[in-house]
Amino acid sequence: MNFNPGLLLDHIPTLAHGFALTLLTWVCGTIIAIGLGFSLAVLQTLGGTFQQTAIRIYNDVVRGVPFIVQLFLVYYGGPHLGIRGDAVVIGTAMLGIYGSPYFCEVFRGGFQSVPVGYIEAGKALGLRRTTIMMRIILPQMLVVALPSVVNLTIVLLKESTVLSVITVPELTYQVSGISSDTFAFAECFLILALVYWALVEITMIAGQRAERSVMKFMQR
Amino acid sequence: MDFSFVFSEWRVLLIGTYHTILVSAISLVLGFVLGLLVCLLRLSSHRALVEIGRFYISFFRGVPLLVQLLLIFYMLPLIGVNISSIGAAIVGVSVVAAAYQAEILRGGFQAIPHGQVEAARMMGLSSRRIFARILLPQALQRVTPSLVNDAILLLKSSSLISVVGVLDLTRASQNIAASSLRPMEAYLDAAIIYLFLTALLSIAGRSLERQLALAGGLAR
Amino acid sequence: MNASPSQQRSGIAPIIDVQGVTKRFGSQGVLNGVDLKIFPSEVVCIVGPSGSGKSTLLRCMNFLEEYDEGEIYVAGQLIGYRTDRSGQRVRDTEANIARVRKPLGMVFQQFNLWPHMTVAGNIMEAPRYVQKRSAGEARAIAERALEQVGLQDKIDEYPARLSGGQQQRVAIARSLALAPEVMLLDEPTSSLDPELVGEVLAVMKAMALGGMTMVVVTHEMGFAAQMAHRVVFLDHGKIIASGPPQAIFQKPEHPRLEQFLRSWKERNALWEPSS
């Protein structure tokens, strides 16, 4: 077997471009997913039956269809409904949409985990509803939600590879291209695997550190 | 939108759905068995085995499934294993599923109070019996919701096998979209079928949970 | 000084013989040279402040914990260790340890019933699979064991539906079903609500009156005063005092024992003692 990883050195510019795009789509997609998920969670917690049912249906549908099918639907089917756009833009937006139900569930669980006693204490002390939300509920909720948020962020990193299928020129797309040009499939995909593995491990370690520093504030 | 063509294409959709269910079901079973093995490695008393288990879990959860599939698809022929795309797909999905199931099972085992094992040892039960009669039943009972959730994730992730050429539901809808020039309808069909399958799994999971809960409470 | 007088004179062999046992946890000494003999049909209560090593001593007796120095013999057999070819002491095989453990039964503070099995399942497990009895025999054994603790009607219930006191009694029945020669009880009532302690103590008293050899780590001084042949006071891993309950409770000689009893009386007295 002929194994020559050095082959990839010739393609560093392309790889760098792909890597940058992976980071871009991942980070932006995650931000969108967190923002959207959080809003949905608030709406669900505070809203009436209609909002709750609607959001539940949204969650079930988005979580019930594979990401790749959703991508195809919007990217290839979208133009028929007037949705046209750059692959990167659509891809990032869809990544955000795909992640939103999961974040919604996490944040909702976080809200529900705040002991009622804390809120009652706030009310008894005369704090306003928004103050209670911002200063008591939110911090508690974030501590509870943090491990899951880190996990979901990693999930979205891995899902970003699927964007290569709709021609978003991120890392997997670039490496696939290089591999079919050079026929060095094994080397290419092995290195690709290692790069993602490293990214995931780094994110996990960063997440653990964040969790530890947040734990300092909380007595459990 | 015109769905009439769907009825002429139902055969392709059926074949695609069949392959999706086939690969998912086989990978679920293989993944569970392999996952249990990896979990035992992870929990064993030999440090070397523990490290092997940890490495396995870390690597196969850290590398995105798409990259894994590409890797397996291209690397296996290199080491002399000639395998069909469906074979590579099953291997890829199973091997990754095993990593997730191993972690889920680990949580289940570690939640069992150690005192129960001590009581069993006091009564002379062998390690094998302790595992089979005390640890495994409780671990399975405890993690059933997570396992069902994992099954749903597995079904969705199976959509990526379309990328390595397996005629699954996703690939079927791609073919239909290309030949009928109606991507919207084609992908919507696939989405609806996936939704139906995941909904079925959710319902099955909940009834399974209920049945297991009736069989006895768990340690607090 | 260690045996109840009648047994010392007749020269019966101890059923548990602890000789010079030391156990360290890092640099901390948990047990420091403990000598203790338990004779058949004796009821020995081990008392002492928290962290004195009482539970550790008990758990060393059935080798749920290792010990660093000394020997523990169960029915004449060394438990936990054997000498290998080079004369070194090494940890014995699980099979051997299980064999030496046979005469011992144990009741835990946390009951440790297996929640996914019924009461019957819990009690029948060892008779069926360790003693290789048939299902019918095992069921009969379970019924008899439950009669001894007064819970026959709960035989097909799941532990989660029983009160703490009932669960502990089932745990006792589970051990009794194997006909042990010695029952080791590790703070059997410490996890129970106060109202439920009595039913477990009643079962323990019945066992003692029936002639069972018992080693009980407990805070229940009342039980010790009534049922123990010997009370052993452990402090910082050493046996400070040992003797019949009257000697220990009414005429404490060692200052640490005196202090221990005084604080117990303060916590448990309902009114000031007259005089």
Image (spheres, coloured by chain):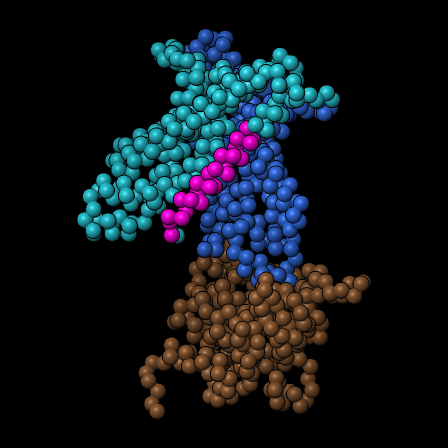
Chain seen in cyan: A
Q: Colour of chain C?
A: brown
Hey, which quadrant is residue C19 in on the image?
bottom right
Left or right of B206 on screen, residue B109: right
Query: In the rendered picture of this protein, how many numbered marks are placed on residues?
Result: 0
Chain seen in blue: B
Q: Residue at x 40, y 48 (%)?
A: A216
Quadrant of the drawing holding the N terminus of chain B: top left
In this view, the residue farthest toward the right is: C85
* Res. A167 visible in picture: yes
- The location of residue B191, given as percent across then percent down, is 44, 22
- The location of residue C34, given as percent across then percent down, is 61, 75
Q: Residue at x 43, y 72 (%)?
A: C197
- The location of residue C200, given as percent across then percent down, is 47, 72
Left or right of C234 on screen, residue A93: left
Left or right of C111 on screen, residue A185: right
Residue C123 vs residue A151, the one in the foreground: A151
- The secondary structure making up most of the magenta span is helix
* Res. C179 visible in picture: no
Q: Which residues are magenta?
A: A196-219
Residue A159 on the magenta span: no
Residue A200 on the magenta span: yes
A147 up-or-down from B13: above or below: below
B219 up-or-down from C28: above or below: above
B51 up-or-down from C32: above or below: above
Q: Residue at x 81, y 62 (%)?
A: C85
- The location of residue C38, given as percent across then percent down, is 62, 79
